[in-house]
Structure formats: C-alpha cells, structure tokens
Image (tube, grey):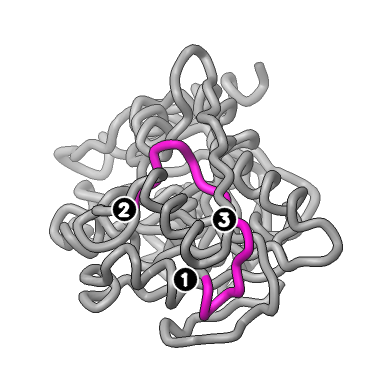
C-alpha cells in the first residue's frame, strides 16, 4: 500500500474509490467502510483511504486529547491488510481545519485522488466547522463527477460501534466487549527501553515499553499476554500502565513482567494483549508494601490467565 503524507499532493490516482475518516482503532464500523471501498474499487480502480494525524479532536483540544486506540502506523497496517491500495495521511493543521467543504471535495477528492466514488458513514461531516454532511457531499459529487455511497452503522451488543465507545469499554476494563467492537483483541505495542532496573531488584524484572499510541485508553495493573512483535508465541504476563507514583515516576510507561522468562528485550518491539484488569494504579508507603502487592497481583494474574 502506498502512503502519502503531503497535504498538497495532486494526481495521486487516475481513478479511485475513496473512504474518509479518523479510523482510530479500525473497529468494525471502520472495517465496514474499508471493505465496501475495496469491493467497489474492484480491479480497475484504486481503493484509497484519507485519514488525519493528529486526530481533529486532538488539534482542537491539545490539552485534552482523546485517548488513542492505535498508532497511525498500526492503523495503516490494518488498512493494508484489508486490501487498501493507497492511504493519504493528511496533517491536520489550521489550514486544513479552515478548508471549506467544497474546497476539500475539489482539492482532495477530485484533484488529489481522482475519485469517482466516495464511501462514508451516515454521520459523516467534513470541511470548516463540520459544515459538510452526507447531503452536501452528494451535492458536490453531482457537480464534480463522483458518486457517494453511505454505509450504515455497525451495532454490537445493542450499541453503535464507535471509537468513543471502544475507549469507554477499555477504560472500564471490559476487554471482551471491546474485542467484539474491534473484531480482534485490544493490544498495544512499543519499543522496550532501559529503565531504573528497580523491578529486577525487587524480584520482578520488567520490560519497560514506550507505547506507540498516547494518550493511552487504559491505566492500572492488568493480566496480559505479551510477545515480541511478529512472533507467534504469546507469554503470560502482568502489566502496569501509568506514571508509577510508588517509585516517584512522572512519565507514562508500560511495565511488563513476563512470567518464567528472562531474556534481553532492549530495543525490541513488544506487543501486549489485554485480558483483564486487576486494579488501579496505587501509591504505597514503602517498598515492602509495594512488593507484597506485586506478589498478590502475580497470584491473581496467573489464576486469571490459567482460567
């Protein structure tokens, strides 16, 4: 899949079927858009995706950005696996935020991608101050020469699937419901970095991981499975996500203690699959209390993963 990051790009495709959105998490609702786009494109046209980095909500509220369900890299990986040919990752900046709906249709969809069909959800909004909706898109399509397909919402457990709902489920620790919305288990990935080695001194060596997607939708202590990215084997583990108040931390970090495993993981990509939440992040009066809690956490996590 070809990836383009130039907001001013033109002539990226001679003829394409385009879908547009944030695609954070690439949940079942997003997948419905992508699959429809790929199916309609067929053999003769490119299936193209337009998405944004950062998310518009993060641009407009930089001090309260939404939690990210996945990194841009993971989003593109999932889109490619679903059959997309081209992804245009547009930098969401002031210029793009102020672009009228008509200009977006003309410059991005037509001049940029040669769109002859556009696939969106029923609640799609675009352009300056979200002035454009599905009706406006169809009106512009009639004038500029592209058709518009609207794809109905996907519902799971009686609720519309959305990134907002998945974030809420993850924050609640309901990973089974989140998996049903995503169509796959929730995971996070990142690079293992050197830490204070305090965990090893306490008898719980950890792989300290900087997550690819921040802010994280989850924090606390969890029963997880972990693997080196791309490997087949998942190993049972306990993971702590947060700023580590018990040891004076301030930076959000993922600490993973893989059971019955001792190997050098520094510099490698680690993937963590969440199974159950054990507790919230806590502070402790001393190291003895921290170690006692870690021992309790291990026993509970081993029981959860065994079941």
Q: Quadrant of residue 85?
A: bottom right
Q: Is residue 155 left or right of residue 248?
A: right
Q: Quadrant of residue 185?
A: top right
The residue at the point 22 percent across, 47 percent down is 246
What secondary structure is marked by label 2?
Answer: loop
In 3D space, how far apart are the residues under numbered discs 2 and 1 (Cα atoms)? 45 Å
Q: Residues within 10 Å of mark 2 (few under 14, many from 20)?
A: many
Mark whose residue sits in front, 2 or 1: 2
Q: Is residue 208 above or below residue 294?
A: below
- Which contiguous range is marked in magenta? 110-125
Q: Nearer the viewer, mark 3 or mark 1?
A: 3
Residue corresponding to mark 2: 132
Q: Which residue is mark 3?
A: 118
The residue that label 1 is drawn on is 193
Note whether residue 243 is visible.
no
**Residue situated in front as seen by the camera: 101 or 274:** 101
Q: Position of residue 267 (x, y in %)?
A: 57, 75
- Residue 110: percent from the left, percent from the top? 53, 73
Q: Earlier in the sequence, mark 2 or mark 1?
A: 2
Please say if 180 is above or below 29. above
- Asked if residue 30 can be seen in this view, the reply is yes
Which residue is located at x 35 percent, y 25 percent? 172
Which one is in front, 148 or 120? 148
Indicate left or right for 288 with 169 as reference: left
Q: Residue at x 57, y 50 (%)?
A: 119
Mark 3 is surrounded, within 10 Å at the Cα level, by few (under 14), some (14 to 19) or many (20 or more) other residues, namely many
Q: Residues within 10 Å of mark 1 (few under 14, many from 20)?
A: some
Q: Secondary structure at mark 3?
A: strand
């Amino acid at each position: 899949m070809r990836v383009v990051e130039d907001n001013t790009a033109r002539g990226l495709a001679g003829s394409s079927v385009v879908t547009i959105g944030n695609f954070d998490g690439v949940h079942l609702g997003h997948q419905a858009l992508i699959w429809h786009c790929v199916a309609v494109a067929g053999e003769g046209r490119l299936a193209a995706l337009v998405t944004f980095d950062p998310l518009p909500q993060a641009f407009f509220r930089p001090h309260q950005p939404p939690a990210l369900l996945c990194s841009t890299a993971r989003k593109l990986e999932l889109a490619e696996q679903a059959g997309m040919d081209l992804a245009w990752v547009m930098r969401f900046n002031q210029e793009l935020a102020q672009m009228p709906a008509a200009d977006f249709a003309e410059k991005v969809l037509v001049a940029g991608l040669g769109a002859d069909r556009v696939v969106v959800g029923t609640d799609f909004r675009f352009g300056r101050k979200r002035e454009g909706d599905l009706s406006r898109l169809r009106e512009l399509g009639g004038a500029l020469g592209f058709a518009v397909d609207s794809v109905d919402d996907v519902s799971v457990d009686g609720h519309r699937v959305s990134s907002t709902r998945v974030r809420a489920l993850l924050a609640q620790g309901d990973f089974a419901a989140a998996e049903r919305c995503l169509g796959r288990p929730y995971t996070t990935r990142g690079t293992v970095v050197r830490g204070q080695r305090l965990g090893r001194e306490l008898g719980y060596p950890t792989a300290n991981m900087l997550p690819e997607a921040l802010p994280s939708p989850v924090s606390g202590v969890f029963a997880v499975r972990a693997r080196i990215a791309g490997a087949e084997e998942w190993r049972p583990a306990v993971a702590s996500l947060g700023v580590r108040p018990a040891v004076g931390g301030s930076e959000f970090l993922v600490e993973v203690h893989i059971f019955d495993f001792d190997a050098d993981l520094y510099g490698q990509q680690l993937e963590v699959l969440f199974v159950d939440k054990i507790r919230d992040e806590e502070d402790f009066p001393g190291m003895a209390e921290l170690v006692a809690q870690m021992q309790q956490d291990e026993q509970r996590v081993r029981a959860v993963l065994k079941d």
